[in-house]
Image (tube, coloured by chain):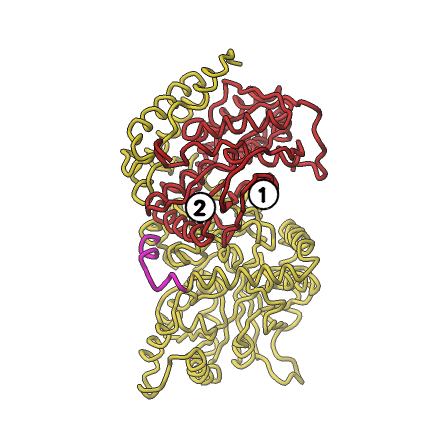
Amino acid sequence: MPQAPFPTKAASQPHVGLFVTCLADVYRPGVGFASLKLLKQAGCRVSVPDAQTCCGQPAWNSGDRPTTQAIAKATIAAFETFDYVVLPSGSCGGMLRDYPAVLDGDAHWQGRATALAEKTWELTSFLADVMRFEGISARLDGAVAYHDSCTGLRRLKIKAQPRALLAQVKGLTVRDLPNPEECCGFGGTFCVKYGDISNQMVSDKVADILATGADTLLAGDVGCLLNMAGKLKKIGSPVKVRHVAEVLADMADQPAIGEAEGPR
Amino acid sequence: MQSTTRQFKDNARAALNDATLRQPLQKLKVGFRVRRAQAAEKLPEFETLRDQGRDLKNHVLENLDFYLETFATAVEASGGVVHWARDAAEAREIVLSICRDHNARTVTKGKSMISEEIGLNAYLADHDITPVETDLGEYIIQLRNEPPSHIIAPAIHVQKEMVADAFRATHTHLPADRPLSEPRQLLDEARAVLRDKFLAADVGITGANFLIAETGSTVIVTNEGNGDLTQLLPKVHVVLASLEKIVPTLEDAALLLRLLARSATGQEASSYTSFSTGPRRPGDPDGPEHFHVVLLDNGRSRLLGTEFEEMLRCIRCGACMNHCPVYGAIGGHAYGWVYPGPIGSVLTPALIGIEEAAPLPNASTLCGRCEAVCPMRIPLPKLLRHWREQEFSRHLPPGRTRLGLRVYRWFATRPALWRLATRAAALGLRMMGRKTGFLTRLPFAEDWTRHRVMPVPQGQTFMARYRAETDTPEI
């Protein structure tokens, strides 16, 4: 695991390559801007390479190794010059950490993949563990429920980091979900390939969300958020759904996921 | 056992619509999960034991031939007989011929998943030998004429009213008006009926949780004591086990026993842990006159040296299915063969073929909870992904999926065109759903919108807005 056991504060003004991730790019550009803002607040120089597309996860999880390899190589080439690669997603961050396995057997590329994996971080863990950032300047009055997305939670060990950052947001209470380790049923293409099973899972998750009585649901992955927001809106729930970066960057004034622009 | 795995999707839909399943599956989630977590928490060395268990089984698998031969020699030295079965058919014939050698009319059985794997009960019944399952859960599903839905709780899907119905339908010699509404009454009735079967059986067949090479012993764990009665009362004891159940020494078995019960039910140890070593010796107060071990391969040795070898570390505790959100939604029968849950989704393609089991490796979100609780640290998500790779390279996924991946690759490896496509998608979806912020219907996305709405994008993509706002040249 590339994660250092005792992370130290990074060199001053590290150069970060922001991998926005395709879902945030298309569905939730606000997450990209929130990430930019937070990284700059934490003292990073941030670049957004234009050669980025998708991390390759749809191909990797479909068993299409050649396609995953092609995308992994392009991503490595686009990001390997930075001090760090940061993504507002545990799922896509986990994918970049998988690149050495994707390129297994190709000594040259595997070396480059390993170097990239070792400097790849999900946003909240980068802010908390690498930058030791404690300067969150945000306010949100109310109670939020926090969903720990699976890859972030189990693969990247992200649980305390977003909570530590959210604890700095004024006016905010964070509530844990019942069954906190349970998958929301998104799973990339799983949610459409096995829509009925996914529906049962997201229905159970929504029941847990509602049980917290929180007025906002936060998580660190746009995919999971679209799934849960899609179900919450389907049943007419008023619970607002946002990416955690939006709240941390004090940018929670835009309409929540699945909500229209208009008078608020 | 005949598989219905090809119809996994239909099976799953039926299970989701089966209202009687919701309560048992909910109970499973709170019961087994909480108890496992507490048991692991209480044992400071639990994580270390998991490492040791993994290493032990890896060592055994690297030296499987040696330990199997050592085991066979020890069984024979203690007066038992070892039979090698390459596949299910051979194993069935071996058991039948042992039964015939002893003119058996009825056999009692302690729980054995291998017996399910080789379809033994139906085969014996076809040859005029009556098999009687003695594990309460197995007995219930035998009466209901269905396979187990869980490897350690075979009747987890059966509510107690359904058990009462099964008993009334089959125990017709008992008064029709006896009360059967309480678990205790059900237990007492099963016990009373089974007691006679234990005494009448000519052959007792059990599975084995472990085979111990140094002593030639077989080990079975139960919570009902039925294993003891099955293997001690009849004059013949047949142990059915697969090759990978072997461990070198008694101490090694002790290590795995510490992991097994905690991972399975959250117990420190199961109520009964029974060791069998050969037939009754002179001076023994009880025990069978004949002791046979049937060692089944059935495709397992093919996994050695492949990326699926790690699967053979499995000790069948069921923790992966207890923690699996997919199993928790649909239960075990939908998987369509003997082994459900994550372990089944890896093992079934290995044992009955990937063509037959193609849906299973895909029916997972790869959430990783199975690997997190597996006492043997089997990387189940990685193995599921290996199966997906095999399916892909054999052109098993439907044409639509393969075409989608080709289109995806074409765009994802061409950033400029990717930008154009994503901008078009973001703006198009935005225009369609501007008023509400979501779409209730979307062509080509019915599988999503059947159960959820589709939130619409905020408008421009991040990349487009970022370039416009910062006016920076592209890197």
- Position in image of residue B221 (x %, y %): 57, 69
Q: As rendered, which of B186 and B334 lies closer to the eye?
A: B186
Mark found first going from the N terminus, 1 or 2? 1
Name the spot of residue B117 as percent of width and height, x first.
45, 60
Question: According to the image, label 1 marks what residue?
Answer: A163
Q: As rendered, which of B314 and A234 lies closer to the eye?
A: A234
In-front residue for pair B316/B48: B48
> Of the residues shown, which amino acid type is indicated by label 1?
Arg
Image quadrant for the N terminus of chain A? top right
Residue drawn at point x = 57 percent, y = 66 percent: B82
Vertically, is A7 above or below B334? above
Residue B219 lies, with reference to residue B463, above or below; the image says: below
Q: Say which element carries label 2.
A: loop
Q: Which chain is red?
A: A
Q: Residues within 10 Å of mark 2 (few under 14, many from 20)?
A: some
Q: Confirm whether the magenta stretch covers residue B324.
A: no
Mark number, residue A215? 2
Q: Position of residue B194 (x, y in %)?
A: 45, 81
> Can you tell which mark lies on residue B223?
none
* Picture quadrant where residue B213 is located: bottom right
Q: Which chain is yellow?
A: B
- From the image, give the main secondary structure of the stretch colored magenta: helix
Q: Residue at x 63, y 33 (%)?
A: A135
Q: What secondary structure is found at the residue carrying circle 1?
A: helix
Question: What residue lies at 48% left-to-right and 84% top-to-bottom?
Answer: B199
Which residues make up the magenta segment? B12-23
Query: For this view, does A114 lie left or right of residue B25?
Result: right
From the top left corner, tell me how far across and down residue B49 is, in percent.
Answer: 68, 56
Q: Give the quarter of the image for residue B222.
A: bottom right
Label 2: chain? A
